[in-house]
Image (cartoon, coloured by chain):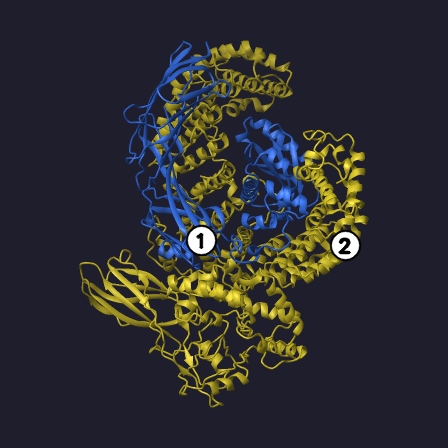
Chain colours: A blue, B yellow
Amino acid sequence: MIHSLFLINCSGDIFLEKHWKSVVSQSVCDYFFEAQEKAADVENVPPVISTPHHYLISIYRDKLFFVSVIQTEVPPLFVIEFLHRVADTFQDYFGECSEAAIKDNVVIVYELLEEMLDNGFPLATESNILKELIKPPTILRSVVNSITGSSNVGDTLPTGQLSNIPWRRAGVKYTNNEAYFDVVEEIDAIIDKSGSTVFAEIQGVIDACIKLSGMPDLSLSFMNPRLLDDVSFHPCIRFKRWESERVLSFIPPDGNFRLISYRVSSQNLVAIPVYVKHNISFKENSSCGRFDITIGPKQNMGKTIEGITVTVHMPKVVLNMNLTPTQGSYTFDPVTKVLAWDVGKITPQKLPSLKGLVNLQSGAPKPEENPSLNIQFKIQQLAISGLKVNRLDMYGEKYKPFKGVKYVTKAGKFQVRT
Amino acid sequence: MSSNSFAYNEQSGGGEAAELGQEATSTIAPSGAFGLFSSDWKKNEDLKQMLESNKDSAKLDAMKRIVGMIAKGKNASELFPAVVKNVASKNIEIKKLVYVYLVRYAEEQQDLALLSISTFQRALKDPNQLIRASALRVLSSIRVPIIVPIMMLAIKEASADLSPYVRKNAAHAIQKLYSLDPEQKEMLIEVIEKLLKDKSTLVAGSVVMAFEEVCPDRIDLIHRNYRKLCNLLVDVEEWGQVVIIHMLTRYARTQFVSPWREDDGLEDNEKNFYESDDEEKEKSDKKRPYTMDPDHRLLIRNTKPLLQSRNAAVVMAVAQLYWHISPKSEAGVISKSLVRLLRSNREVQYIVLQNIATMSIQRKGMFEPYLKSFYVRSTDPTMIKTLKLEILTNLANEANISTLLREFQTYVKSQDKQFAAATIQTIGRCATSITEVTDTCLNGLVCLLSNRDEIVVAESVVVIKKLLQMQPAQHGEIIKHMAKLLDSITVPVARASILWLIGENCERVPKIAPDVLRKMAKSFTSEDDLVKLQILNLGAKLYLTNSKQTKLLTQYILNLGKYDQNYDIRDRTRFIRQLIVPNEKSGALSKYAKKIFLAQKPAPLLESPFKDRDHFQLGTLSHTLNIKASGYLELSNWPEVAPDPSVRNVEVIEPAKEWTPVGKSKNEKPAKKFYSESEEEEEEEEEEEESSDSSSDSESESGSGSGDTGSDSEDSSEDPSSGQESETGSEAEAEGKRVAKRNSRTKRTSNSEVGEKKNEKSKASESSSAESSSMEESSSGSESESESDEPAPKKVAQAKERKLQQERNPPPRDVFLLDLDDFNPVSTPVALPTPALSPSLIADLEGLNLSTSSSVINVNTPVFVPTKRHELLHRMSGKGLAAWYCFPRQPCVFGDKMVSVQITLNNTSDRKIENIHIGEKKLPVGMQMHVFHPIDSLEPEGSVTVSVGIDFCDSTQTACFQLCTKDDCFSVNIQPPVGELLLPVSMSEKDFKKERACPSALHLLSQPRLLFRIAAISIRCFVLRCD
């Protein structure tokens, strides 16, 4: 399956290579560079490239390209998903998935890659297992290791590897037993010029942070599980109980993980918490235009909307912008033409607005279309779909865990066309 | 620490190395000097010294640096001799790094690599399974042809290893060996065959991968493992799932007949199953002669939960499986999940959108409800935008076209001009496919001709040209308008299109055409080749229709063309001249010149680029690239007639050992004597000591998986009160700790899952485990005789012989009984009432020789009857009629072999429901059903309980039938939990002991005085109740 992996940074240096079968020369990446050049934008590099002898499947993550070399037919998603898992693991181990972090920990990276794949087929990708096989680097451990000569490599097979709950390691012990759940909902929406909703839907996830000793068996129930239309589960969840009782029953992995992600059924109308008044115009045959946007709260369920930022990709002809915000601060990058306005909180008494002039390249035709506004916001203590966790029960262990649920609503891909 | 270590430039190569190696000498040389490798050779000298030092820390340091070099792609091969010496290092980290090195360079240094082989051979015998596994892994990764026999031997041994982890590695090694030496194919296939029978979820994915790589055509190896694979699927790790699903898709296409009827056949009884999540599925009223093979259905049903996987590859794999093998009406369930994947990162989106694009061409309806999910955002990368656009086009129909066109209007204005151009093409396609909007689209496109952006205009011109070609004769105005554009537009394709259009319609615009030709003649030399060709064409056409005005012009152009730099144009010029200008040399052809040039040309078909992609299996690399990738396996067409389905039957040879109690449950000692081979016992014990096996192994062996609910629910649901009972369960190797764990789990499940037995999956997996375990039994029989629990120790050879015999003539079944030390004689013997025992049960009991012995078995009244009712028909879907069923656990009055089922009917509507009866039955082969008498009428709010008898044939197959009222028929199904197929029996201790002595089909799973519970039917395990 996966033959080799090359890590390539933004400037086109191959800074790490790993081969699981016989060695493939670095020159195979030339085809990739060629495609990259053609695509102009990193986002547009095709994930699957065919070369005379190999196929290259790549992902772009955190300013790095993970390019894998394939020789025979394989489901491309298989490889893509795996590469993302590799990147996730790096992120998990080193705190960031960057060139520097990987270079600093090249030995651990190599050990990880060796464990994750055998002959190109995934062997252990579960973070709980990997952490037992190869301990993540910490400052303390590296000091201890250098004194005692002990190593980062575990010498027994992780218990999870063989059980049918491979995601959990055995012998977990905590003094404070806690289980936290974050219900995070994102509103994806396209709002058209006139302010009416073209498309809106709610996507949610429940992220869990479980620090419980032993082998707890949890079940999480909702007040209104029918809201969840389409769900994808962490493998720990017992699908049958969900099917029959709409209860999430699972033996959790240790630590942080994503329990479920869901989509709220599209029948429900989505409440759009903010509205935007905008007036962007470019004058014909003149080198300036007007820019004026105001943001106000709409159906916000009585909560404050905070963390608002507005990002606008201005047309190429815009040279500079001269704006005054009533609140927050803005930046305009004349190279990428991105306007970013960090608004902060909305106070209904005084609606934040950003007004001013746009300088255009003189002589160039006025832009055809007004740029669309990408809006980010956050509402604490609210799940916009109305989803509510009913209760969390624990079986299998005697102690009383500390439980907590937090709700957040965010803007996902929230776009206002102007 | 070697003092000269800081002379290396490579310090920062391994951050770890830097940390370790440098704290003593903090005055290190340039740590940021990456890639300053000028003194490679010198450095290597130092590394050699470090590797030869006797301090582990120095060695480790050196190894880390070497790994750093490998990672950078630098050559470190000359260190081979120094490194390979450390292969036997005690330090596990050094060892691992040496392995990394070895695998990388062994191919180049074959002779030296051989030095390390003996170390691996030793390690293959290590008691630690991790070490065994990694030794096998490295050994098989060393690509040195000389060691092929050693590898082969190691693989064979490892494939019989007790640790599933080692067996998994053996499966991987198969592929490596195969790529190293394809000659070994036959032998490897044998190993694959053996490993395919493995019922560990850990092994399944890897061995199927090996199968796909080594012998994908040996579909016959799959037959007997098919059901097991289907049932294990949910519990296999996600990567294995992908591989297995793809393989099973291919398998299904060769083994089952097509479920696709011309009228989109839908099996009635299955509708209920999916109805809840698939609202848009319309009711199909008629039954068709086609019935789906139960195995086909099994695959479709068992893969459905995987649509909920977090792994996009798994979801896609299931989606393609549904697409390729499920009845068309059921494929709808996948669209929701695929649309969900669109939230993922751009690479996943790209692949998924491509697949949706292919699907949406063939079955629009599937994705229509999700139309808006494909709306384009300005922040999407261009490749995603164009794919979305493609899908939107495919989904366009009369109903949604106006919304779509409005949406397209926004896209046309996009700053991303490439995308805007694609949108224009899309509009063109919509215009041709939906005739209602052709004019609207055309008008819109004409408006775009005055767009400021040239690319947009050019694209519009091209599209308009195509549209006009389809409906000529009406659009003189547009052509005139376009002729004017020639002055301003510079994009060659657009200019060429306009010229062609004018040429085609030159008779309709007689005034403009010669003028255009005049202008073009002037600029001919500076035009693009594409345009030049069209100028020549235009000239020729005008010459033929209007030679008076254009003769000279055309000749001028032809002269220009004659001396053009491009040979294509020279060629064309020569050709046209001969054809249209009459001279003595030109033959008969010139008479037809007009017909040739101004022939009626067929309109171009605007088609989706994804149209022809569906001949590739979805979700594959070949599909993505639209070329056949190497190693792509074609999906065969459905066979006309299904091959013999019985090949998938797994005959149950004898009770599986995994289910038999090995008597360790409480007292180890008495158990030990049962082992005929002490060696094996040791091994088994040893394995148990390796903590890891504790729960997993036996769990998976009992075939559960998701099954911790599976097998437990059985225990608990049947009798939640007995905590100890878990001990009596299937696995007897249970050690204290494990038992405790299991107990706790049982408790938990008993809390939550009492009677929750409706879940087919768990049962399915149970029964499959049964099958698989028995298979395992038969296979392991030859290797290591494992009938450890034989009451009287026998010699191996003898046992083998007997076994062979059994294989030949299945019946006389063995009883494996426990040594019971404290037994309390009670119970009044009663004659065995055969009724209510299902046939195979009877067969088993016949083995007891009841007729000849005086022993008597008493069927008990159930101690515990679950009160849980299962829903048969929901009142919403039953138009007010609600039905529930439960198992009263009483002997069935309708027949011996039947299980009695009580059905409670409720009228929740506000009118009388009349003539409730059971309509058509769709029972699997062999199953029978005794129906209840039709109920004349049921008053509103009324309720009536009837009982029916169903002979499930000892299987957990679903009984499907129709519940009919006067007006309607509702398809319903009942699937029994395993436990309901059995009957509790009791016997006296005396009889019991007697039975124990004679070989037959009883399995005693626990201590006396406990309530014994029934395990599972299909493996013929029975539990007696001793009072």
- Where disc 1 sits, the SS reads loop
| Residue that numbered label 1 is attached to | A237
Chain containing the residue with disc 2: B
- Where disc 2 sits, the SS reads helix
Q: Position of residue B93 (x, y in %)?
A: 68, 48
What amino acid type should be assigned to the residue bearing mark 1? Ile
Displayed quadrant of residue A40: top right
Displayed quadrant of residue B368: top left
* Residue B63 shows up from this direction: yes
> In whole angstroms, how far apart are the C-alphas of marks 2 and 1?
44 Å
Going 75% across and 31% down the picture, which residue do you hit?
A: B37
Q: Is residue B891 above or below residue A114?
A: below
Relative to the observer, which residue lies in front, A171 or B755?
Answer: A171
**Residue neighbourhood size for the residue with mark 2, other residues' Cα within 10 Å, grouped as few (<14), some (14–19), many (≥20):** some
Q: Position of residue A270 (x, y in %)?
A: 32, 37
Relative to the observer, which residue lies in front, B386 or A343?
Answer: A343
| Residue that numbered label 2 is attached to | B117
For residue A40, side relative to residue B284 (left or right) = right
**Residue neighbourhood size for the residue with mark 1, other residues' Cα within 10 Å, grouped as few (<14), some (14–19), many (≥20):** many
Q: Position of residue B266 (x, y in %)?
A: 39, 55
Relative to the observer, which residue lies in front, A214 or B487?
Answer: A214
What amino acid type should be assigned to the residue bearing mark 2? Ile
Disc 2 to disc 1: CB gap under 8 Å: no
Displayed quadrant of residue B192: bottom right
Q: How many marks?
A: 2
For residue B106, side relative to residue A335 (left or right) = right
